[in-house]
Amino acid sequence: MYFAGVDIGSTMTKVVLMDTADRILSAIKGPTGPEHRQLANEVMRMALEQANLQLDDISYIVATGYGRVNVPFADAQITELSCHARGVSSLFPNVRTAIDIGGQDAKCMKIEKGKLVDFVMNDKCAAGTGRFLEVTAATLGIRLEDMGNISLKSTKKIQISNLCTIFAQQEVVALLSRGEKLEDIIAGLHDALASRVAALARRLKIEPDVVLTGGVAKNIGIVKAMKENLGFELLVPEEPLLTGAIGAAILAKEIYMKATAEGETISKRARLLEKATFFG
Amino acid sequence: MSDKSKGLSKVQEIYRNRSQRAKELKAAGKKIIGYPCVYVPLEMLTALGLVPYRTYGDIREAVTEADRALPTSFCPIMRTCLDCDLKGKNDFLDGMVTVHSCDPQEKTARVWESYTDYPYFHFIDMPSTVRPEAIEYFKSQLNDFRKTLETFTGQKLSADKLKSAIKAHNQQRALVQQLYELTKPVPPLISGIELVQVVKALMSLPVAEGNDLLTQVIGEAKNHTDVPKKKPARLLIWSSSLDDTDIMQIFETKANVVMDETCGGIRAYRGSVKLTTDPLDGLADYYMKEITCARTFRQATLGETKKDYAKDIQSRFGYLKGIVKEWKINGAILLLVRYCDPFAFEMPSLKDYLDSIGIPSTYIEYDYTIGALAPLRTRVEAFLETIR
């Protein structure tokens, strides 16, 4: 039997296909696209192709993430908080605190025995999210994926005092014209973002093991800054973008197995491999 | 027609078109007095034949006009209330009464008075603790309110008139308490969305008409079969004001909302006003002590020198313990309206109290607009997943 997790984030759509033994058969990441959520079916198609499976071969599909509602080929929706918690604990069984920094939100989850028990999320603001880095990278004229390595060369601590993305952008321009080095500015930006997320996480009691996930965890400079700001060692999955989709696939299996064990008929949707639409 | 009760259909009609009845009454010669907060003693308006009409903002309307007068990083409820008035949406009102229930309302009152043109405007000052001196001071404020009302109406507000108005409003309180009894069964006989509609309808009608409507809704609800479906969670919603069904919908998609502590809900209807020799004594006492809004601080003991936190939160939130048990509540959502300081300050202690009685809770902040409900939905659903 096969199960699928579809994580439609604000920036990236991720699909993971798994078998009953939680082995990953395929994992595909694609942009969510400017037309929100419209590429989900494409990402799903690629994942099926890679695993050499048809949509009907999948016993149960859970959709998660910002675009989880109205995915025409999903059987159930579960929030990204529960899915991340489940996905992270499958990779790191001793996890107690998980921090996920995505394209437009940051969240901190308390996990007990693999289950989400409490959480906090950022408020409606880009500070402390991937968008903060995207905007400032564009201002600096560098690629987002180069920020981490450049920041490691920093020798001088620069404090970015503005946490608002727009004001930080102006501050960066001012720093550049003052002749500050690129690597120092980027390290300063990383520290600003990390301090914001760490403050959010401290609203819950942070306990080890602490795991960092989300697209922003791919930035080595952020991982370093988060360690410094939290005062804890951080574990980062090999592919930090996928924990939500992995968790969704595992939860799909668990829901399906529990229902069949209890002799219930699974209510599967008439699936259509079509574009996902927005919240009704 | 479905099994939906006639009373509830009437309620929904009023909810959709709130000002219609007030406009009819105005055409028939009645005077309509707006109020944006449940701390205005409506009994005093009713006693003089005035029709109280609760004004709300509009979560669907972008605030534009009020920005001329108020800062933007400021209570969004007061901003939208004033905005609606400045846009002429409440032009049928003959007057407005506001109260110092919180600082934004007090500051807005001054602006309101100078930017709008109602024939009658009154601001009631109100202390924020329940010390005896505070209640005495509040009574003096109610006396001032009485005087401006008498001048406005040209009538004397006699103790007898006031007492009979108090009786009518007490009857409304008793009826609303009966209405909330309907959410005790599993599944409840009335939904949280319907409760919002009923209360909003009540706050648009003269008290006697509201009482008739309530009697009908309660009478019919006991028999109708079109009841909410049983959901895994039975929630308490705590908020400053929750007065729109689209917001309530977010909670009720995957849970039954069976109790609230909001001023779009039961807050204005708990307990009853004591009929004292001078009726203003009973009113002052009720509004200071009985309405459980975060704007009033109910300290445990007067004159204590060292604070006992457990005793303190018991005295502030202890009334919830029995409610949680009787309504079989298994989760609470603390819904903060952005920039609402009184509720933001109250929230951590309330969370501690709910923890102490074993009720999981989560707090969610929103800016009192319909715009970004998706993040709100995610937080609510994730919370429900943790208590499942």
Image (tube, coloured by chain):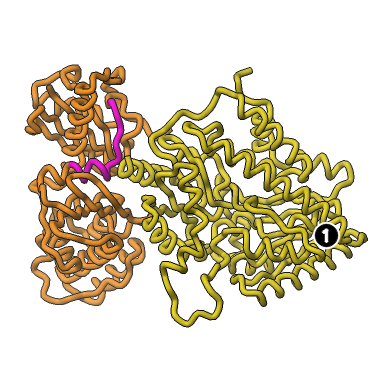
| Total numbered circles | 1
- Answer with left or right where residue B42 lies relative to residue B350: right
Residue that appears at 78% across and 45% down: B206
- Answer with left or right where residue A115 lies relative to residue B290: left
Does residue B176 appear anywhere in the picture? yes
Q: Nearer the viewer, residue A151 or A221?
A: A221
Judge whether A26 appears above or below B298 on screen. above
Q: Which residue is mark 1?
A: B119
Q: Which chain is yellow?
A: B
Residue that appears at 80% across and 69% down: B143
Q: Quadrant of residue B76?
A: bottom right
Q: Nearer the viewer, residue A197 or B186?
A: B186
State which quarter of the image contains the N terminus of chain A.
top left
- Answer with left or right where residue B311 lies relative to residue A254: right
Specify the subunit that label 1 lies on: B
**Identity, as a three-letter code, of the amino acid under mark 1:** Pro
Q: Nearer the viewer, residue B259 or A104?
A: B259
Residue pushed farthest bottom? B305
SS type, badge 1: loop
Provide residue A35's location: percent of width, then percent of height: 33, 36
The magenta-colored residue range is A75-86
Provide residue B2's location: percent of width, then percent of height: 60, 19
Provide residue B66's location: percent of width, then percent of height: 62, 59
Residue A81 belongs to the span the image colors magenta: yes
Query: Chain A drawn in what color?
Result: orange
